[in-house]
Every structure is written in C-alpha cells, then in structure tokens.
Image (tube, coloured by chain):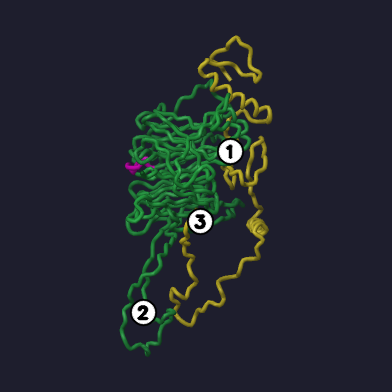
Amino acid sequence: MSQKQDEENPAEETGEEKQDTQEKEGILPERAEEAKLKAKYPSLGQKPGGSDFLMKRLQKGVSLISYPLLLESKGILGMKSIEQKYFDSGDYNMAKAKMKNKQLPSTGPDKNLVTGDHIPTPQDLPQRKSSLVTSKLAG
Amino acid sequence: KLRHHSITTVTLLPDIISTVEFNHTGELLATGDKGGRVVIFQREQESKNQIHRRGEYNVYSTFQSHEPEFDYLKSLEIEEKINKIRWLPQQNAAYFLLSTNDKTVKLWKVSERDKRPEGYNLKDEEGRLRDPATITTLRVPVLRPMDLMVEATPRRVFANAHTYHINSISVNSDYETYMSADDLRINLWNFEITNQSFNIVDIKPANMEELTEVITAAEFHPHHCNTFVYSSSKGTIRLCDMRASALCDRHTKFFEEPEDPSNRSFFSEIISSISDVKFSHSGRYIMTRDYLTVKVWDLNMENRPIETYQVHDYLRSKLCSLYENDCIFDKFECVWNGSDSVIMTGSYNNFFRMFDRNTKRDVTLEASRENSKPRAILKPRKVCVGGKRRKDEISVDSLDFSKKILHTAWHPSENIIAVAATNNLYIFQDKVN
C-alpha cells in the first residue's frame, strides 16, 4: 500500500498510516475493518474482492449473495457459501422428497376423467389453475 | 417537496418479496417472491361516495410464475425466485409483464373475464353434444355476466439462453424487443420469438482466470431504442449504441469515478460494485446504487457523477462483520420519482432513504408495523453515529441487518411508493387533506 504522505506520527495500533487530515476520518474505519478481517482470516488473498470471489459466484447453483434465512456454511477463505450440488437428478429428487415428506408423485391425470366417448369441451377438461382473487391478506 | 407519507396498506405476503414494480400507469403493482409467485395489486377506482379515500391497492391476481428446476448437466438446482418483473405498456384490454428467475424469462398475459357464453344450440348444460335428432330449434348463445375472473396465462417462455444468473430484464422503447442480462452476457430478444436471441454483450474472457468483473445490472434508454447501459461489479457503467455494431463489446461511453489509490482497502472493490442502475424518466441521467451511496450521472459527463448521496456511511466502521455475514453483498435497488426530483433507496433495520435533488434534503423513514398506524404521518428516523444518543435515535450497533429493504418502487406520476420489507409490502401514499 503506497501512501502519498508519511507523517512523523507513530502508526496507530492497527498499523495504518495517516493521510491528509480531511480524509482521515473516512479512511481509518475501512482500514481498521480490513485489519480486523485479516487478523481473523490470515489466508485471505491479497486481491481485493478479486477473481476468487467472482469465480465462486459464477460457479454456484445458488447465488453467492445469500439471504440470512437460508442455511449457510463457512467455505474456504472464511467466505460463507451456499453449495447445493447433487450427484444427479435422482439424488436431487430424493433430497426434495425427504424435505417435503411427500409420497411418490401420482402417475397421471385423474383416472375418472371421461375420455374417448365424446368430443371433450372446455367444461369437461381439468380446470386450469385460475388465479385466486383474494381480498387483502392482512389489514 | 418531500412530504412524510402516510401508510395506506401493509400486506403480509406468503414469502420473501424479491421484486416490486408499478406498471406504466401506476394502476397495477406487481410483486415477485422467493417462491416463484407473482402477486398483482390493483388500485381501486375512486368512488364518489368516498372522496376522502385515495384509491387503495387490493390484490388483483396471484399466480405461480416459476417453479424450481433441476439443471441435469451441472447437477444444480435452479431457484424459482423471481429476480425481476417488468411491465409492458398496455396496448389492449389485457396486461402483459415479463418475469424472470435465474435462467428463464416468461411473458405473462393477465386478462379479465367477466362474461360467459350461455345457451348453446348443440350442447347441453354440461357441454356434451346433444343428439342432433333432438334439436328442433335454432338458438344463438348469448354472453351473460359472471363473477370477475382474472386469469394469468404464460404466453411466451424464453429459455436456455443464459449460462449464468439473470440479474436484469429491460423492455425496449420500441415495445418489440427486450434484453436480459446475466453475469457475463446480455441477450436481445424479440417478444414473438422464443427460440432465438441475439447476444449483444459478452464480457466472458477467453481464459476464466482473467475474469475481473461481472455485469450487475442493465437497462434500456427510456426513449432511444438503440441505447442501453450496463453496470459492473467494479463500479463502472458502460453505455452502448446498438447502431454501432451487432456485438456491443466496445462501449460508446464509459462512466467511472476516479478513486484515490491511497483510499484503497480490501473492501473498496466490493463496496463499489453497482447493484442497480436506472435511467431517469427524462433519459438525461442515470442513477447507480453501490453499497454505501447513490450516485446520479449526467450522460454527457463520463468522468464523475454529478451528485453523490450517502445512504448509510456509518456502516464503514462495520465492514468486517458485514463481510462475514454476507451483508456486504446485499443488492439494494434505487428508484426515481415521476419528475426525477427525488430518489429513493433502501437500507437496513427496515429503513429507507429519500433524497430531494433540488433542496438537497434527505430523510430516513422506517417501514414497520409497530411504528405505523394506517393514517399516521411517518416519523423521520435518525441513526446516531457516535457520542451521545438522543432519545429517538438508533445507534449503529442496534441496527437489525436481517431487516433489509432491497426493493422499492415509485408510482410513475404520483407520490405513492411501494416498499418491500421481507414478507411485508408497504404502500405509502401522500395524505389527502
């Protein structure tokens, strides 16, 4: 980190160097925070928010940008990540079924549906899911 | 004039709201949620009996737009969360909107049905064909009124065009095309054609190791159908002109604010990442939102923004923990009011901020059930940065970072705003005197 001015005052506890007085207040918090982070995760790369982070973002099935309500696990570099990889579609479906505790999906449309003996009309066919017209859900 | 709006509606939706958008007249307000559902609100017509009540927004239609899918090739789940909704201008009795998740854009038609044909000559009441021998008279079906039914039907599905996650969609002013943008590419679509799209921007490097920035948002110019902008994770905006070349990899204008290199820290690039870019209604300015500020840029000046507004600068001293809990990656949106005189964006603790560009005054308001009554005037909030905390102020350490307002919308012409706070949709309207 190259600095424009090197004042004679001794460095702060966090090891930062002082800047022009006007910008002092703005910079110190950010640098202090950076030092805090590096103290916690020494293996953190030098590249600020660089390609490591971007690559992770692109490769994920679920976005790296997480919602607090989703499950998280600390990945490498101390970054939280959501990795929902499945071995194959069967694995995926098993996971889904376990989550919802559902039985195997039904084999097809209702067997009682009359077909074949007359030309079906719109009224005969299964109702298309129409949108719900509901009143305000909460006052 | 910045007025302190009063609340007219708080609606609890079944899932976390992920996008909010008024249509071009402001009559309809659409929300998309994490479960792939779209809920559309419609403004009540003002009735003569209730002159004191401005039209309130009631639920008009609810439908499931996207379902979770499985990418067999990558063994990954595709979320059904609706990332963006954009309305098409109304051209007939039906309403059309685009909704998108990470991979697929859909065009939905929302139409009303309030009549049904009755009295068929050849069919009986159940719709079965009658024996022709029993038919002795001619009868023409008539349309009879029925209870209003609002139907949403998917008219087009634009799929399989994005390798990476779609972050933006934008309808072009020609009303014939629209674009969809993911992390590395932008595609141009014609509404009528679903099996082809033109790739107009591709920033994927030949060697992925050289990747340094991604596309974060994109939007068409409101009037010039050849012009669009896209923002990046490095805090830059590129304006492209589709007349210049088919592939707009080379920008026409490049907007970047120079950074003092001595200010650089580990967080600099992350907090400079632009989470939203919006053209002003006039088309003369663009507004960008990065983690701590909102900036207004004049299209005629590329080297720096003309205005910079601090949203929550006090977070600078919290960047370490905000990085650890991923909040530093939160993508806040920003909006213009109808006259481009006020801009609004969200923050944490269910706060949202408004900045009046003319008077340079700003206000912090809170979207919370506890603090608001249906007809009350919203009280401005204040965050105490240090030193003595006044009675009504909140200290930075007390802020709830799980209560974030990422999505807001402003009515195209009136002072009505929609604010999404997790599952709650707040609609604030100016108090009528």
Question: Which label is found at residue B262?
Answer: none
Q: Position of residue B367 (x, y in %)?
A: 50, 42
Separation of residues labelled 2 and 3 (CA atoms): 39 Å
Is residue B183 something that shows in the picture?
Answer: no
Residue bounds of the magenta highlight = B220-227
Chain A: colour as depicted = yellow
Q: Which chain is green?
A: B
Question: Which label is found at residue B120?
Answer: 2
On the image, numbered disc 1 is attached to which residue?
B401
Q: Picture quarter containing residue B92?
A: bottom left
The secondary structure that most of the magenta stretch takes on is loop
Q: Position of residue B46 (x, y in %)?
A: 35, 54
Kind of residue sitting beneath label 1: Phe
On the image, numbered disc 3 is attached to which residue?
A137
The chain under label 1 reads: B
- Please tell me whether residue B327 belongs to the stretch shown in magenta: no
Q: Position of residue B50 (x, y in %)?
A: 36, 54
Kind of residue sitting beneath label 2: Tyr
